[in-house]
Image (cartoon, coloured by chain):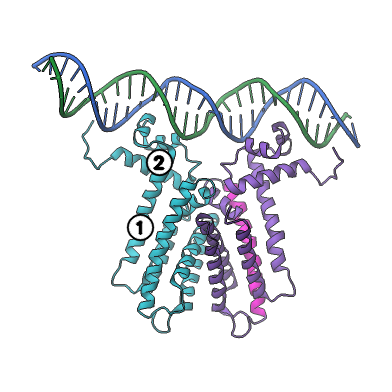
Chain colours: A cyan, B purple, C green, D blue
DNA sequence: TCGCCTGTACCAACCGGTCGGTACATAATC
DNA sequence: GATTATGTACCGACCGGTTGGTACAGGCGA
C-alpha cells in the first residue's frame, strides 16, 4: 500500500480514464458500473470510496472530457498569438476534422452525445453542458471580434451569431459523420464552413 | 371491439404512438417496456403479440417518425410545385425552426437523438438512420439541382455538398437548441444558413 | 375456429448502491 | 514499548428493485 501525494489519486484517475473510454462509445445510461469496474480493475466498494454515485462519476468524466478538449483543441488553436484570428478559426475546424479522421468516424463528440442523451432528462447535465458549449462559443466569439478589430472581418458580421453557427454546424457534422461512418461528410462541412467565413471576410484581408 | 380493416391495427398503432412519445424524450435505452405499457395501457402479453422484441418496436418507431417527418415537413416544403427551388429550401428551414419553437426547445430531433445514442452500438439502427439522412439529403440535393437548372444557383455550387452541409448544420442547431433551451440559437442558425445560400446564389435570381 | 386481447406468474440478468470486513500506516495513550 | 485508536484504501457479497422476455390459461366477438 504505497503512500500517495496529497494531490495524486491514481486509482480515482484510473477509474475516470476507464469510464471515459466506455462512456464515449456507449453514452451515460448504457455504461454500467460493472462495466467500469471491469475495465478499470477496481472493486466496487473502492469505487464508492472515490465517487458518491454514478452521477458524480458522470460529472467528473464530463469535466475530464472538457479539460482534454480545451488542452488539445481549443488552446492550441486559439492561443497561437502569431496567427491571424481567422486562421485560428480555420485551425480549429481542421483540428476537429483530423480528430474525426483519426477516430475513424467513431464516437462522435462526447459532449454532443451527452447533450443529446441527457438534456431533456437530467437538468444537472443539461446545465453543465450548456455552460460548456457557452465557453466554447465565447472563445470563438472573442477570436471573431479580434478579426473584426484587425479588419479581416466586416463590421456587419455579428461575431456571436457566427460563433453560434460554427459550433452548431460542427456538432451536426460530427453527428452525421458518426452515423454514416464517412469522413467525407466532415470534410464537406468543414469546407462549407470555411466558405461561409468568406461571406463576412473583408476583401483582401483574410 | 369494432371490426377493423385489414390494414388498421389500432392497438399496435396505440402502442407505437405511446412509445414514440416516450422515446422522443428519453431515447431508446432509457425507455423501458414497462413505461411503454403503462403509457399505452396495453398488457405485456399483448405487446408481444404485435412486436417480437424491443428492438422491433424501436425500428417501427423509427419508421413512424420518418413517415411523420416526410408528411409534415419534407413533402409540404419540397412538393410545392408553384414555389421556386430556393424558396422550398427556405420553407424547409423555417418549418424546422417553427417545430422547435412549438416544442419549446424540448426533444430535439428524434432521428438525431437515436443517431447519437445508437450509431456506435447498434449496427441495425445506424444503417437505418444513415439511410434516412441520405433520403433527406437527396431530396434537398434534387431541389438544389433544380435551382441550378433555373439559374438561381450558380454552376460552381455542388448541390450534394451544400445539401450535406444544410442537413448537418440543422442537426447541430437543433441539438444546441435542445441543450440551451433557447430558440434564439435555432433562429440564428437558420438565419446563417439562409445567408450561406447567398454564397451560391446567382445575382438577382434567388 | 380464429384473431385479438387480458392478466399474471415466472425467469435470469442487470442495475446502482450498501455493508461488513481486511490491510496497513501512523498517531496517541498508558 | 506495547496497545489502542484513527484514517486511508480496498474488497466482494449482498440488497431490493428493474429489465426484456417467456409461457400460458382463458375471454370475447366475428
Residue at (71% x, 64% y) in the render:
B75
The quarter of the image holding the C terminus of chain A is bottom left
Q: Name the dominant secondary structure of the magenta segment.
A: helix
Q: Position of residue A185 (x, y in %)?
A: 52, 63
Q: Which residues fall within the magenta stretch? A: B123-149
Q: What chain letter is assigned to the residue under label 1?
A: A
Residue B130 forms part of the magenta stretch: yes
Q: Relative to residue A12, is residue B121 drawn left or right?
A: right
Local secondary structure at mark 1: helix
Up-down relation of residue A172 to residue C22 (above or below): below
Residue B157 forms part of the magenta stretch: no
Q: Which mark is residue B148?
A: none
Q: From the image, tell me which residue sits under label 1.
A: A70
The quarter of the image holding the N terminus of chain A is top left
Q: What chain letter is assigned to the residue under label 2?
A: A
Q: Position of residue A101 (x, y in %)?
A: 44, 59
Residue at (67% x, 36% y) in the render:
B38
Q: Which mark is residue A57?
A: 2
Quadrant location of residue A17? top left
Amino acid at each position: 500500500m504505497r503512500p500517495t501525494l496529497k494531490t495524486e489519486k491514481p486509482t480515482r484517475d484510473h477509474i475516470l480514464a476507464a469510464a471515459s473510454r466506455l462512456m464515449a462509445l456507449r453514452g451515460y445510461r448504457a455504461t454500467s458500473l460493472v462495466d467500469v469496474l471491469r475495465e478499470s480493475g477496481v472493486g466496487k466498494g473502492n469505487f464508492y470510496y472515490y465517487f458518491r454515485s454514478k452521477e458524480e462519476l458522470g460529472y467528473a468524466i464530463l469535466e475530464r472530457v472538457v479539460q482534454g478538449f480545451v488542452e488539445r483543441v481549443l488552446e492550441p488553436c486559439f492561443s497561437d498569438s502569431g496567427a491571424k484570428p481567422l486562421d485560428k478559426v480555420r485551425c480549429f475546424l481542421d483540428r476537429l476534422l483530423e480528430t474525426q479522421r483519426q477516430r475513424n468516424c467513431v464516437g462522435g463528440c462526447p459532449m454532443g452525445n451527452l447533450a443529446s442523451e441527457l438534456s431533456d432528462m437530467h437538468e444537472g447535465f443539461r446545465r453543465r453542458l450548456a455552460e460548456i458549449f457557452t465557453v466554447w462559443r465565447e472563445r470563438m466569439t472573442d477570436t471573431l471580434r479580434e478579426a473584426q478589430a484587425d479588419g479581416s472581418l466586416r463590421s456587419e458580421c455579428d461575431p456571436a451569431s457566427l460563433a453560434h453557427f460554427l459550433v452548431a454546424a460542427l456538432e451536426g457534422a460530427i453527428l452525421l459523420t458518426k452515423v454514416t461512418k464517412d469522413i467525407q461528410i466532415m470534410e464537406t462541412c468543414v469546407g462549407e464552413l470555411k466558405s461561409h467565413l468568406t461571406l463576412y471576410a473583408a476583401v483582401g484581408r483574410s
